Amino acid sequence: GGKVVIADIMEDALATAEAELKQISENVISVKCNVTVEEDCTNLAERAIEQFGQINLVAPFAGITGDGLMIKTDRETGKVSGKMSLDQFQKVIDINLTGVFLTVRECAEQMINHNCRGLICLVSSTGSLGTAGQINYSSSKAAMSVMPKVITAEFFRRGFADKIRCMAVAPGYVGTPMVKNMDKKIVDNIVQQVPINRLIEPDEVVSLVGELYRNEAMAGETVFIHGGLRLGSKG
């Protein structure tokens, strides 16, 4: 029953997703969008209003990883042999953090101006707890875990926190095609840290987002969905 606007920078993948969704409903449009470009995010929010008149659920889930150690040392000498480049750090921050900020800001503006009711749902991660080799990714996801509190406080001050809520979901290891195609030994080692003894299914994350949308008592918090994951003592 939903009316959907999907956005991505990859036009082929976007077209495929739009075609799949249109098998369910014709109420789907796709918009090419680079979330790091302010004008693209403005256009995305405006197109949603032009097409459907309301924005009720914002899901700014664009994100990438760019793993690597901040400082690499030589095993023999103990001296520094490499560093994470500024570009490697900045690219992840630009998409995962700045891109989310721009998307949320532009959609929130349209929601306020058009008297919309709904949810802004961010995606954090268990990486926000601090995982070695992910100083860029973990920093961006830690930011996502505090944003709902900040946004809710700002909306509360302005008197519309009851109409536009903000929450975040924080998945653990999810059985996406990318994860399932990883080396089996790596996946097995991951699962050994998960008490429910399996990866989280994408549909389970979707179900949680749906519940946060339906349950209007949920505001300003981050909800973990990770099967009880226990990170090792070395992160």
Image (cartoon, rainbow, N blue to C red):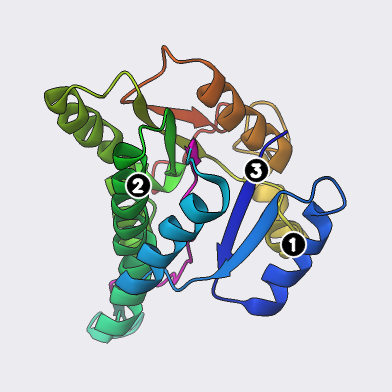
Please, what secondary structure does the residue beneath circle 2 have?
Answer: helix
Please, what secondary structure does the residue beneath circle 1 have?
Answer: helix
- The spot of residue 113 in percent (x, y) is 29, 41
Query: Does the magenta portion include 15?
Result: no
Residue in the picture at 65% in, 43% down? 3
> Which marked residue is nearer to the observer: mark 3 or mark 1?
3
Q: Is residue 156 left or right of residue 117?
A: left
First to last magenta residue range: 56-70
The image's mark for residue 3 is 3
Q: From where the camera sits, is residue 19 visible?
A: yes
Q: Residues within 10 Å of mark 1 (few under 14, many from 20)?
A: some
Residue furthest top in the image: 217
Residue furthest right in the image: 23
Q: Is residue 8 left or right of residue 232?
A: right
Query: Does the magenta portion include 67?
Result: yes
Say which quarter of the image contains residue 37: bottom left
Q: Residues within 10 Å of mark 2 (few under 14, many from 20)?
A: many
Work out whether mark 2 precedes mark 3 in sequence or the reverse, and give the earlier one. Answer: 3
- The spot of residue 120 in percent (x, y) is 41, 37
Q: CA distance from mark 3 to mark 1?
A: 14 Å
Q: Is residue 58 left or right of residue 155?
A: right
Work out whether mark 2 precedes mark 1 in sequence or the reverse, and give the earlier one. Answer: 1
43 vs 188: above or below: below
Q: CA distance from mark 2 to mark 3?
A: 16 Å
Work out whether mark 3 precedes mark 1 in sequence or the reverse, and give the earlier one. Answer: 3
Instruction: Tell how many labels.
Output: 3
Q: Residues within 10 Å of mark 3 (few under 14, many from 20)?
A: some
- The spot of residue 222 in percent (x, y) is 38, 30
Q: Which residue is mark 1?
A: 17
Residue in the picture at 21% in, 29% down? 155
